Image (spheres, rainbow, N blue to C red):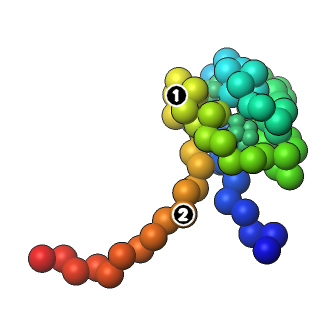
Amino acid sequence: MDVWPLPRIDARRCTGCERCVEICPTQALAQVAEKAVLRYPEQCVYCTLCEDICPTQAIALPFLVVFGDAQDK
Ligand code: SF4
Ligand code: SF4
């Protein structure tokens, strides 16, 4: 039950613009050393707002990835 997909932030892509930090409704994100980090993962409600607003696609929410039956052809 504790397995919960959380936003992943690619520090190499993050420019530190803080848009995600500002839009996060639960203050789960924070700016540390000019990079966004998921500081309070337990507060994340998985709203996807941070992913949507990030101008550099630094944030990815690992949605439920469903592997269909690979039927190439
Ligand atoms: S919105 Fe994207 S680029 Fe801006 S601080 Fe957040 S992760 Fe970094
Ligand atoms: S998914 Fe929503 S609650 Fe979670 S860190 Fe991003 S903006 Fe905050």
The amino acid type of the residue labelled 1 equals Thr
Check residue 66 in the rendering and tell me which mark sits there, or answer none. none
| Residue position for label 2 | 64
**Residue 21 location in percent, x, y?**
75, 26
| Quadrant occupied by the C terminus | bottom left
Ligand 1 has an atom within 8 Å of the beta carbon of the residue at disc 1: yes
Q: Residue at x 68, y 48 (%)?
A: 46
**Residue 66 location in percent, x, y?**
45, 70
| Residue position for label 1 | 56
**Residue 26 location in percent, x, y?**
82, 36
Q: Residue at x 75, y 47 (%)?
A: 45
- The answer to whether any part of residue 35 appears in the image is no
Badge 1 marks a residue whose secondary structure is loop
Q: Residue at x 18, y 77 (%)?
A: 72
Depicted 12 relative to depicted 5: above or below: above
For the residues labelled 2 and 1, say whether their Cβ atoms are less than 8 Å apart.
no
Q: CA distance from mark 2 to mark 1?
A: 22 Å
- The answer to whether any part of residue 63 appears in the image is yes
